[in-house]
Amino acid sequence: MQFKSLQYWLLTIVFIVFHTTINAQTTSLKLQSTAVPFMMISPDARSGGMGNLSLGMTPEANDLFGNTAKLSYLKEPQGFLINYTPWLKDLGLSDVYLASAGYYKQLNEQSTINSSLRFFSLGNIDFTDESGSSTLPSQRPSEFSYDIGYSLLLNDKISIGATLRYIHSKLVQGSFGATAINYKAGNTVAGDISMFYKQNDDLRGFHAGLLLSNLGGKISYSNETKNKYYIPANIGIGFGYLNKMDPDNSVEFGVDVNRLMVPASPDNTDAESVNQYFTQSVINSYFNSFSTKYGVPFSESLKASVGIEYNYTNRFYLRGGYFMDNNKNLGNMQYFTLGTSFQYQQSKFNISYLVPSGGGITKNPLSNTLRFGSIFYF
């Protein structure tokens, strides 16, 4: 795989690893660059079939990758699941993918524990300088996160969840350039806080979800400890409405809105701006991300998902969705998704497809890609 073929979010890695100057990044062009962008990829095919919609929809086992507060409402007391998402398959690549696995177990009627693993392979990458000369031996970067979580029912309508996460990111290792900077794998810890509300015991009617994700420390990729980068802290809120037309048929509608809590990347020609960006604390960065001085304009910072799910006897599902990223500096990425799933005995199989959309830097890495997931209940 050639390094130049990765999409805009992977270009962030170039900035992190090589400390390059992005000339287009001025005060008039505000971008939110983070380390470990794979943490922003929805790993499951159910959500992927509804435009990445999940926070306020009816509970499913795949919620252990997001709003874990919903797990205690599942009818099955425990389950194991796996998901596989090819990445950049439309470009003919086969060694770039996101794989995930998880397990949950209800301890009693009120509480549930869960654990999950996400692994992102970036394939084989050849690193070159501006002249095209090789600068480092070919490497095979990868990243992973490991979670443990707990969810609790506060009453018959509200539940909460908490997740502790370890993140490991190995992008490039070794020395580079005349400064002999020693690049290494980055490590950090983070956590999620989630909440879920349902109107009725049978989930008929209105429900809502709230998720604060990736709240944690910065991450460093070199022996220059002053240059530590933010991980993609995010706040998301979702709403859903379930209409049961009869005992066998139901349809559910939902909407999610997400926003990164990361300050805008600095103007690299302004030393004071760069210093302020790297020296502010993580807590301050959350608040600064909402400010007009350090953050991205609010109207350009939102990501929205809308979707629908049809359910027949809890055995067969059809899904559709639409995703919109309102950041004009990243191409206003928008796309439609389709999905389906069926359950046989104690196993459920999810499939989703992203309708081809965009071109160039706005071309979605999942265009023309089928995503797969399986759940095995016990």
Image (cartoon, rainbow, N blue to C red):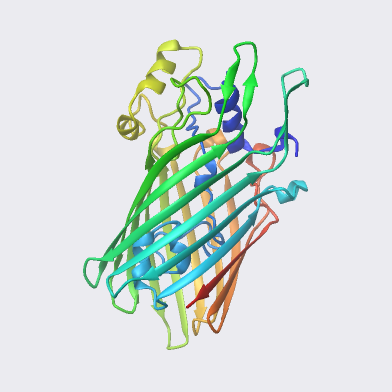
* Residue 233 shows up from this direction: no
Q: Position of residue 183 (x, y in %)?
A: 58, 25
Number of on-image labels: 0
Across and down, in percent, residue 50 comes to: 53, 62
What residue is shown at x 44% (from left), y 17% (from top)?
Answer: 274
Relative to residue 70, is residue 21 drawn left or right? right
Q: Up-down: is 355 above or below 283?
A: below
Give the image location of residue 125, x and y in percent.
72, 35
Quarter location, residue 342: bottom right
Q: Residue at x 75, y 47 (%)?
A: 93
Residue at screen point 56% across, 36% down: 330
| Residue 369 left/right relative to 198 | right
Q: Quadrant location of residue 194?
A: bottom left
Q: Is residue 291 above or below residue 308?
A: above
Residue 372 % position (x, y): 62, 64
Residue in the foreground of this view, choosing between 329 and 139? 139
For the N terminus, give its image quadrant: top right
